[in-house]
Amino acid sequence: MKYYICDSCHFQFERTGECENCPDCGKECVRESNEAELAEYMKLKKEFNK
């Protein structure tokens, strides 16, 4: 599983493979999340999946 963030709209998401376009805004500004972004994503995921 890889974790991504869009530099344009800041949407965070996960995928099992490579990703070139943001599933939210459609732009090609996607990159893998850094450690801080990943920690925030996991925190929010845990809160919303209660």
Image (tube, rainbow, N blue to C red):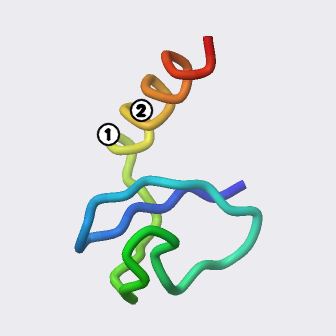
User: Does residue 45 sit above or below 31 in this rendering?
Assistant: above
Q: Secondary structure at mark 2?
A: helix
Q: How crowded is the residue under tag 1: few (<14 C-alpha within 10 Å), some, or many (20+)?
A: few
Left or right: 16, with 44 as reference point: right
Checking the image for residue 14, the label placed there is: none
State the residue in front, 40 or 22: 22
User: Does residue 27 sit above or below 45 in this rendering?
Assistant: below
Which residue corresponds to mark 1?
36
Q: Residue 11 placed where, x, y %?
A: 37, 58
Q: Amino acid at mark 2?
A: Ala
Q: Residue at x 40, y 61 (%)?
A: 5
The image quadrant where one finds the N terminus is: bottom right
Left or right: 42, with 16 as reference point: left
Q: Residue at x 44, y 68 (%)?
A: 24
Name the residue at the top extreme.
Answer: 50
Q: Residue at x 46, y 65 (%)?
A: 32
Q: Amino acid at mark 1?
A: Ala
Q: Please give the count of numbered marks on the rendered protein.
A: 2
On the image, which quarter does residue 19 sit in? bottom right
Q: Residue 10 placed where, x, y %?
A: 28, 59
Which residue corresponds to mark 2?
39
Q: How crowded is the residue under tag 2: few (<14 C-alpha within 10 Å), some, or many (20+)?
A: few
On the image, which quarter does residue 27 sit in? bottom left
Name the residue at the left extreme.
Answer: 8
The image quadrant where one finds the C terminus is: top right
Label 2 close to label 1 by CB (< 8 Å): yes
Left or right: 12, with 3 as reference point: left
User: Does residue 27 sit above or below 39 in this rendering?
Assistant: below
Question: CA–CA distance between discs 2 and 1?
Answer: 5 Å
